[in-house]
Image (cartoon, coloured by chain):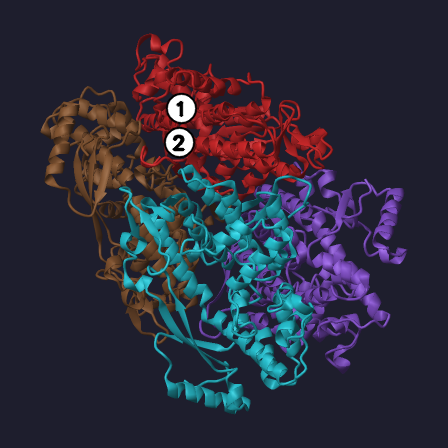
Chain colours: A cyan, B purple, C brown, D red
């Protein structure tokens, strides 16, 4: 935000959409808030830059981009006769702006190691409620929309559904920064095809190909980017590191850590007293990618060989091998890998668990179960996307696809 | 680099050029080396993302991108009859790949605070020489080219001159990631217009408009991005922070720091003994953006008010005001600002020096003095760009433009 | 082709790929030939610009673009160890360059009216053979490849198959110029994944998502662009016009026509004698979009009301209404439309046939029957795309989809 | 315009801006009018596609694109507090939509041959007045704005000035379709920097670099595209052809021509009577690129050697050689060229005038004389761009640059 206070129209350059305009003063103040500024230091795709080096974009830009698309959508819906009050407009813009504010650094990784009890949605809500206190209730409507407690259901659907501004922005943005052209979608066209029927968000029939393409692009981005096995390997290494650090710390071992990371590793709070009860939101609000990675780098010299080896390998990008297949892995094969790892690295069984990991990943391109995408036909009938589409009425695309993944050090060679 | 060892053709996705192909095994091994991998954690434009939030791209991609352009240039030159041996090709590709390997985190900032004696070019050379030892002399030609000791002078010019692959890549890349369309240049056309006359790199006459545009784009990027006053303000704050930290540390104050930062702050080396004599390259090779920023964040809680206040302001993006003008600042005005700052913040004169800073920045769009750009006319005569161009024969564009900049806290209000 | 003869490297600006380089003198001479230059005046997508106004790109650019992709493919295949001789390289480049040279103006339309006996592939071959005579046999290998009579089958597949350079270029190009982002494909990635197994063109397994995306994009482009019902309506009107003109001409009616169109309308050849036996290639080589459209415009004033009305409606873009549905149209409904048309326009049954037309269009996204796309697994097994893909093993996508279309004047209103 | 009448929001795909929305019914009706539809058949850049093959975009898209930018500008100005009534909005949108409606095919060429007395601006006004009659006065405000008779001067400046929507669109669009990246400008940023001071259109100071870039881009596009000497050669050949046809026709020679072209060649009107007095607007409204080019093609077989030779050369792209230089051509040199041409082609002096042509072209990047671009400083002072800019205060850029051009057949070789 260049030159705050100077010019009334505040614009932010965005390589994906050109310019993003901040609509009003309150939005500007929310963006300036330290809770929101923290998102500048949290990469949208965590360690994905190990495979796609340009994917260093942050949650800050994603939040602004989603808000930008929301504004366009509201304009389209109004032009088609849907009434949206000024207060609802602010509410839904704030809701989308803050929808990801609870993300921590490498957040899915953190959820599997240091902060197991709260999802990032829970945390986003904690932040919104705290901001609502600080901004004297200005976020009340936003919170009702976010929690799906607002009567006009389509407002919540714009924030969170299978066709929300979040997904539309992240697909475009992640595709742009990874350079994976397969993820390109026609943002303009999708948004122009949105409409409201009853209180539900729907898509006009002539937009069906764009929606199919959107579902396809999402599926392709899952397998090419989000669930790319080398990315998963890096993630798993970071989980092993944080679990080992927690284990050592719980065992009384002294570990270097930035204060904000220490707060969640050892429970020694930076912020004191009742402010941190039950969850220390303020300490969390200072935690970002730098804390994690500078600590990981420092642990390369730690005397615990499990910790130091995995840290060194992650920092220098000697990543675990990842095997991915449709069927579960054969138990004998797994046993052989574990044995070989124990022998080669001189580890016991418990330690081997940090090096040999079996996991399962799932991608659900479109789920006709939950909040489905509805198509508005010319005769005003509504059909579920999976019925309306010649292509997506197919079990394969709409059913979840799961794959089994096995990770182990590259020096192990059993096949 | 996805799946090393699997496929012979290794491609890296790049949003700017599509795909970057790694030409051979040795290049691959250099890229995999921890010295080079470190560049993944050093942002190309330091704190510029405070103004252009998407500018989080790293020196890693820039180095690969420059190599990609170099390959294209060699192909063009060969197609025009210039002989380039296989060894020269490798040499110049290695030289451009490693030309920035000596950059530390926020490197111009570091040079003004913690590492004052060595430029990043010096450090790049130290790294290249160390890598040459590790790779048994494979970089000898690259080093000769880099040092401009190789007979075919155009090879050095492709690496370092006013029209080198470094500049062409960074202009394109920085323009792409900031979203500043004014910086877009026609990379393909510029490269297609390159030729060699004698042993010098020249440009064919019909490429002159593209070169003018390149010079213009560079100038515009300077004022809109590289020397944007809000970016400069953030930079100056980081310099103040590192200087204050150094001052406190020299005075015996205990300061949190990651080990690699501590090595340069207090001289306590991580790597021991003669390996660090005279410069501790190995410690330096572990230092990146994370070390700096996680330490800055921690210092927000330090008891020294100068250090903690500037750190808090930088982290939460409450940046100094920056005034920029063509003439030097009036001494009375500066005195008033300093006095007001002392009073408002309760500082002494020395401490005020961390908050009120006067600086001068200079941009030289094209310098006909040093290694000039030569235009090859159809009659085989050579002209300097500033003579050949109808527009750039003008003092204004080719002379350096300097501006005076004054920084001080936003709460100070003297006008 | 700017400045022929001046510079050895000839480049043509192309907004899709940047620069297209003409590889050698012979290719240059082929491009300069009047047969090839004619393609500048034949729009790639005929009347599609009535719906997508920027789709005015021509077959000239498509031919150059396909050649450009072919060069890249050859480079990729060679880098993977496939041997391709210099002669084979020229052959396959000429074959792709000339693959569409037989297209007439609005060619599918012409095939349904004035030139019913020869497909554009037949005509392309006639042109190639004539050029081969003029260029003393230099196209012999190209012709063998084009006719699939060359032993290395993959060369023909690069020119004509379900994954040929023709398709890859036209999808990218048509998507670019229509502005239909759904058609964007990752050209670079697809080409980088090509390989040869035996003598067949195959795709490496890790390219499967890009291929799926390519098949999907092709399908979407069919329904959104190529078979867009408004585009089909304009096409049908042009067919009605040309059929009516032919009918009138056969009945001895005097009709304005450019000489080249007259040659095919009345059989009065411009080129004389045996040169035109059996097909008057030279007259055809002068026929382009301008001949058709300037004649259509002139016929707006013809005294035959069928001809003049359809011409006026086409020129002023008052297009027929098009209805599209999965099932055949109800006979009663058709009879009612025809009756109403006869009454409203005062026509007899035969004349009504120019205004009310029933048609059927078919799109086959991927056909596993004919020349299938083969995927090369890591264990060197080959699978058909429809088996290898989790998504495309589905009857819906790979079976042909047909739709029934009905066209009639907009003033008719029966529903 | 897909599916008129169906959906209230009408969108047109545009590769440059994504989607262009037609704001209301009346605009829709204007676009549907045959006068406007004619623009689909008039290429924006005439014969430029002989050098940049993709530059086949039409005036139709340019008109829509300019309207799209106008809408964005009005939104920006209103957000800054400038009052613009609903009627003024319609007026200025109609004015920009129709600003080029008077362009004939290859219009600058026509003005130098067949229609010497009226400029395209005169013709645009004739069309607007006729449309105003047909639309019962709905265009009255538009016409006042177009003629600069409306009090709020900035409205006219948005339509016609050195920074109007016309120029901004054509630079972006021509750059996009030629593939000349040098012409890329930051449309979004320029428009966001517009403001109104008094009743004048101005630019905020922080937009100055974008404006400089815009002036530069315009200058570069002039020399690389609009005044490219090969393009000029093709233009001159077409002028020679039309002049010769007119000469032959005046001499009583019978010439093939489409009726609409004949109307201007021989004065035989298609539309009869007083409707064509004094200028036959209706005949002109039917004339487009096809008429010219189909006649030129036909004249390849005409018995007049001057006409047929130039036509053949133009159609088959054997273009005249063009020499361009800063000084006037030497008279002896010209005489030698003319003599050689007479001898080689067997022509007399008058006929040689169709083959050897001397011309002068001028480009004025920015003229501080006429309607200058004004910069709004932070202190609310206004400066002319040439004073405010560090770079453009230079005579070279702002003075007109003229070059002398000589055209003659390539077979002539005197140097």
Q: Which disc, if any, is residue D241? A: 1
Residue A169 versus residue C9: which sits nearer the camera? A169
Q: How many marks?
A: 2
Under circle 1, the secondary element is helix
Please tell me whether residue D15 is drawn above or below residue B133 in the rendered image. Answer: above
Under circle 2, the secondary element is helix
Tell me, yes or no, whether the two marked residues, 2 and 1, touch with CB atoms within 8 Å. Answer: yes
Q: Which disc, if any, is residue D314? A: 2
In the picture, the quarter occupied by the C terminus of chain B is top right
Please tell me whether residue B90 is drawn above or below residue D78 in the rendered image. Answer: below
- Is residue C100 visible to the viewer in this orientation of the structure? no
Question: Mark 2 belongs to which subunit?
Answer: D
Please tell me whether residue B213 is drawn above or below residue C208 in the rendered image. Answer: above
B131 relative position to C303: left or right: right
Q: Residue C144: image x %, image y %?
A: 27, 56
Residue C67 versus residue D393: which sits nearer the camera? D393
Q: Which disc, if any, is residue D183? A: none
């Amino acid at each position: 935000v260049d030159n705050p206070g100077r010019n009334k129209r505040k614009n932010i350059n965005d390589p994906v959409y050109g310019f993003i305009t901040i609509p009003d003063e309150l939005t500007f103040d929310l963006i300036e808030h330290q809770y929101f500024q923290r998102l500048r230091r949290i990469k949208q795709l965590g360690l994905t830059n190990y495979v796609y080096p340009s994917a260093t974009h942050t949650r800050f830009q994603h939040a602004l981009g989603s808000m930008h698309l929301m504004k366009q959508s509201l304009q389209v819906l109004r032009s088609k006769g849907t009434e949206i009050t000024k207060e609802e407009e602010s509410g839904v813009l704030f809701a989308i702006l803050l929808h990801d504010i609870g993300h921590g650094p490498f957040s899915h990784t953190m959820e599997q190691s240091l902060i197991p009890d709260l999802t990032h949605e829970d945390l986003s809500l904690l932040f919104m409620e705290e901001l609502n206190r600080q901004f004297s209730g200005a976020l009340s409507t936003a919170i009702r929309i976010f929690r799906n407690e607002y009567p006009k259901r389509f407002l919540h659907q714009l924030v969170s559904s299978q066709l929300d501004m979040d997904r539309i922005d992240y697909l475009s943005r992640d595709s742009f920064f990874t350079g994976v052209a397969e993820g390109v979608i026609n943002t303009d066209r999708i948004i122009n095809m949105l409409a409201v029927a009853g209180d539900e968000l729907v898509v006009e029939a002539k937009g069906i190909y764009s929606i199919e393409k959107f579902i396809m692009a999402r599926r392709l981005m899952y397998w090419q980017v989000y669930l790319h096995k080398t990315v998963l390997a890096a993630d798993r290494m970071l989980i092993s590191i944080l679990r080992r650090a927690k284990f050592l710390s719980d065992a009384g071992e002294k570990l270097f850590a930035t204060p904000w990371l220490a707060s969640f590793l050892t429970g020694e709070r930076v912020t004191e007293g009742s402010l941190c009860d039950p969850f220390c939101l303020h300490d969390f609000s200072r935690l970002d990618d730098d804390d994690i990675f500078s600590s990981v780098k420092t642990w390369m010299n730690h005397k615990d060989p499990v910790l130091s080896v995995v840290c060194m390998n992650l920092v220098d990008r000697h990543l675990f091998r990842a095997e991915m297949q449709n069927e579960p892995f054969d138990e004998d094969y797994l046993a052989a890998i574990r044995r070989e790892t124990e022998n080669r690295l001189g580890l016991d069984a418990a330690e081997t668990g940090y090096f040999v990991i079996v996991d399962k990943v799932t991608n659900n391109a479109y789920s006709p179960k939950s909040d489905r995408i509805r198509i508005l036909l010319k005769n005003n009938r509504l059909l579920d996307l999976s019925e309306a589409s010649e292509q997506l009425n197919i079990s394969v695309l709409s059913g979840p696809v799961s794959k089994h993944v096995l990770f182990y050090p590259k020096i192990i060679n059993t096949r």
